[in-house]
Amino acid sequence: MTKPSIAKLKAIIDADEGIGDIPVIVSLEKINSEEPTWNVRIRGSNGTMTITDPRDITDYKRFVTQCFRQLNVFFPPVKPVTWANTLRDAIPKMTEKQADEDTTREGQFRELLETFLTNRMRGREREDLLRGAPWEDEKSRRRYFTMGPLEKFLEIERMRNVARKDIAGWIRALGGGPQGLTIKNKRTRCWWVPSDAVDEAPELAVPDMPEPGL
């Protein structure tokens, strides 16, 4: 009995797997941030899928679900090893870029911190820290604040589920850190950032009001 050639065996395996019907990734882009995302394009579709969970790429069933959800295309099942080989070919061609700063969690935090430190509710005296208001020490060029009121402000501005360790890391990245201050004989744990780490909110000119009619 003649043994089938390697090429024939491969053709049989490919036919069994429906190799022509599995997704072919033609473009794979990774956007790096605290929570990276992937933009994926497949052959036969003009659309681009946005993937936020890496398991939606590495797990074939989940990837096919994303294809159906985002591109309205469906693919039959294949063995895990077939999809693994497909990804192995696609990943070396993947491009990477850094997310725009204002689209990251850290970028959003910096914008909100600036608002928190320079809004109208900021304190004028050191003692105002006790009521939760931020205060600027013009001599040391530092802006002081306490963590609790900042967290509440972030919640109000819909930046939720932020761990304190992340906030602390972002503050340190701005050149700041924790510092204990004695205010009215009370030791208060505060945080600070350099005054020039944020831009002062511009003062809006008061419009001229027309004279009331007599």
Image (spheres, grey):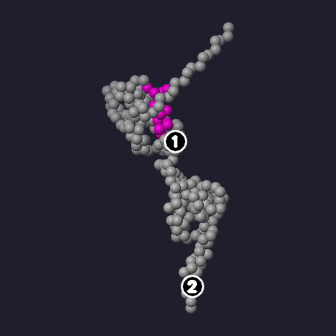
Q: Any mark on residue 102, and which?
A: 1
Q: Is residue 13 visible?
A: yes
The residue at 60%/17% (across/down) is: 208
The answer to whether residue 74 is left or right of residue 119 is right
Q: Does 11 appear above or below 108?
A: below
Q: Which residues are magenta?
A: 109-123
Viewer-side label of 1, 2 = 2
Query: Where's the C terminus, which quadrant?
Result: top right
Q: Tell which circle, 1 or 2, labels the residue nearer the N-terminal end.
A: 2
The amino acid sitting under disc 2 is Pro
Asked whether residue 157 is drawn in magenta, I would say: no
Amino acid type indicated by mark 1: Asp
The residue to which callout 2 is attached is 4
Q: Is residue 203 above or below residue 54?
A: above
Q: Looking at the figure, which quarter contains the N terminus?
A: bottom right
Furthest-bottom residue in view?
1
